[in-house]
Image: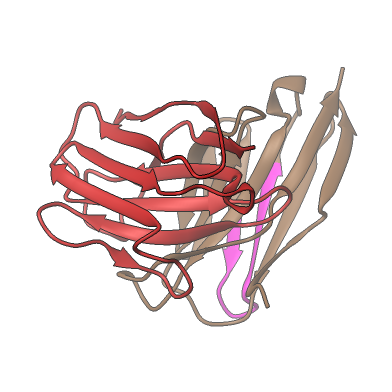
Chain colours: A brown, B red
């Protein structure tokens, strides 16, 4: 059983739309990561969250520790945002391994 | 920013042969590197933690004699898939960090798509 659940699995949007990707986990965490995996497979780290909200450009990540839920938002989406977005929680405290969600495949149409 | 280089990007090999994948940290020293495997439409799964100068730590279910890891220097870890079989066909990706575990950013290689015929 994957302890990190993402929704939706697939998402198609028109350019300019506001995107929300959700991530839920079942146990308490010390940190949660959002990653972007490009079509070729390469992975880029977007955010690490332990509380509250972080913003970088058009990307916003929020986390609610009590509800064990995090969201990744993309404002004014663009075709170049098309990728798989993965959330991952750190297992067993700050020194633990990462447990990954299956990812959300985003396609932004021009 | 920190860069992790992984080679090759893709490899096709015959069943029974061995394949070596390299993971290099280009502008920082990494005492620890991580090797992951990803099957299509599945999550990244940690295979092993590579420790410079010592034996790798393998996750449950990962055969250490089949997936040989060598971390001989602070900038290079290699994963060798020995006697590869078609079921080993997968996407393999490494990661490293210039900071202690739990740090802000993670740095990944570009991944290696292995196809075993």
Query: In the image, is A60 to the left or to the right of B22?
Result: right
User: Do we see residue B106 in this rendering?
Assistant: no
In what quadrant of the picture does the C terminus of chain B appear?
A: top right
Which one is in front, A7 or B80? Answer: B80
Q: Main secondary structure of the magenta part?
A: strand
Where is residue A27 drawn, in percent x and y? 56, 82
Where does the image place residue B3, in percent across and percent down from the top left? 32, 29
Which residue is painted at 9% across and 54% down in the image?
Answer: B53
For the point 44% across and 75% down, the residue is B60
Magenta highlight range: A62-73
Residue plotted at (69% across, 52% down): A103
Q: State left or right for residue A54 relative to residue B52.
A: right
User: Residue B94 lies in magenta, yes or no?
Assistant: no
Please state, as top left, top right, bottom left or bottom right, where the N terminus of chain B lies in the image: top left
Res B113 seen here: yes
Q: Against A31, is A81 above or below?
A: above
Judged left or right of residue B78, residue A72 is right
């Amino acid at each position: 059983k994957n302890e990190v659940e993402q929704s939706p699995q697939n998402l198609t949007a028109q350019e300019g739309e506001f995107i929300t990707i959700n991530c839920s986990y079942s146990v308490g965490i010390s940190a949660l990561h959002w990653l972007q995996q490009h079509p070729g497979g390469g992975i880029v780290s977007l955010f690490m969250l332990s509380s509250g909200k972080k913003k970088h450009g058009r990307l916003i990540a929020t986390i609610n520790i009590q509800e064990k839920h995090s969201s990744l938002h993309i404002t004014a989406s663009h075709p170049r945002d098309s990728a798989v977005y993965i959330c991952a929680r750190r297992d067993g405290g700050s020194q633990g391994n990462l447990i990954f969600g299956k990812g959300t495949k985003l396609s932004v149409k021009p | 920013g920190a860069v992790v280089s992984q080679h090759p990007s893709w490899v096709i090999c015959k069943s029974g042969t061995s394949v070596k994948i390299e993971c290099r940290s280009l502008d920082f020293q990494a005492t620890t590197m991580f090797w992951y495997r990803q099957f299509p439409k599945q999550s990244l799964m940690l295979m092993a933690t590579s420790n410079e100068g010592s034996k790798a730590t393998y996750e449950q279910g990962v055969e250490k004699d089949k997936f040989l890891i060598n971390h001989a220097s602070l900038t290079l870890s290699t994963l060798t898939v020995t006697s590869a079989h078609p079921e080993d066909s997968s996407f393999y990706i490494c990661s490293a960090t210039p900071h202690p575990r739990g740090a802000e950013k993670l740095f990944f290689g570009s991944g290696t798509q292995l196809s075993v015929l």
